[in-house]
Amino acid sequence: MSDLEFQNGDRVRVHTWYPPGHVRTPYFIRGCNGTVIGCAGVYENPEKLAYGQDAEHRPLYRVQFKQADVWQDYQGPEQDTLVVDIYEHWLEPDT
Amino acid sequence: MSPHDHDHEPHPYQPDIEDAPFTERMVMAQAVEELLIEKGVFTADQMRAQIESVDSRTPAMGAQVIARAWTDPEFKARLLEDVNAATEELGIDAGHIPIRAVENTEDVHNVIVCTLCSCYPRLLIGLPPDWYKSRAYRSRTIKEPRTVLSEFGTELPEDIEVRVHDSTADLRYMVLPRRPDGTDGWDEEALQGLVTRDSMIGVSLPKSPD
């Protein structure tokens, strides 16, 4: 898949959008910075599929976040992480 | 004398399923089910068979897969690459939804949650336990995983990474636990007995051989 916008190791930021409807990007991860650790394949966009609309295919990335970057008051050690599956259109380069 | 001709206090009353209120959503589900059958989309027997098939999946199927991965490094590599294809080698149809296995190592302990709903590799390890679907597990595992794990009796060293996977979208996850120490020379069947449902969710470790 050469037309992927992001590669493994890329630093990304999750958009802080709040659209209504069936969205698979959890609230708590919006606005957070993480690292792409893989592409999990290409799937029909659930935001359209849920309503029976023609759904275009979108790459789904596995993005890893440091817990301390997601929760300011995270109690565990600094190496703990979180991996969330996020669609490409919800990500932008972290510059 | 029949069993109920005795004169102690009455037994507590066990409610029937129908005693719970019939909610609007239950009415909708039943209406859709009846319509699909009436319109011939599928038959009542096909629906029953599908429910029976899903209900027949158990953690023992997952344990079979894990034990094979513990004893066959090449199978393990194929499993980490593509769970659905690898399980087919064992005659297990894990369905068309892609499942990803995440491997516990000396340095990383994986835990699975679905914060948005209750995504779970049902066709491989059966239906999820009720607590997996609870709001408490879903909201707490993502932000205080070590506390949740300790409530399950799982204390992990401070120097390893706890990695929580949120199955938010099109993948289902299962944990490939570490093979317990002291099991050298054990065969696959014996190893299967050490793999538990909770160890494949990651809230626990496999049973110890002692």
Image (tube, coloured by chain):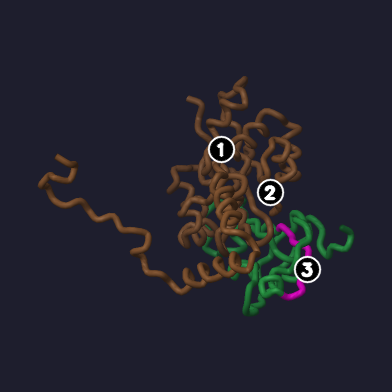
Q: Which mark is residue B89?
A: none
Give me the residue at 52% from left, 68% from top.
B29
In the depicted view, which residue is nearer to us: B137 or B83?
A: B83
Compared to residue A30, the image places residue B122 above or below, namely above
Q: Which label's residue is closer to the chain start, 2 or 1?
A: 1
Q: Amino acid under label 1?
A: Ala
Residue A92 drawn above or below residue B11: below
User: Which chain contains the residue that carries disc 3?
Assistant: A
Left of A42 or right of it: where is B28? left
What amino acid type should be assigned to the residue bearing mark 2?
A: Arg
Label 2 is found on which chain of the structure?
B
Q: Which residue is mark 2?
A: B100
Q: Magenta part of the protein: which range?
A: A53-62
Spot occupied by residue B8 in the image (x, y as percentages of width and height): 12, 47
* Residue B166: quarter of image: bottom right
Q: Tell which chain the image draws in green.
A: A
Dot 1 lies on which element? helix
Q: Which residue is mark 3?
A: A93
**Can see residue A52?**
yes
Q: Nearer the viewer, residue A13 or B113?
A: B113
What kind of element bears circle 2? strand
Disc assigned to residue B60: 1
**Label 2 vs label 1: CA separation?**
18 Å
Q: Quadrant of residue A88?
A: bottom right
Residue drawn where x is 79% and y is 70% of the image = A56
The chain letter of the brown chain reads: B
- Nearest-to-viewer mark from 2 and 1: 1
* Residue farthest top in this picture: B185
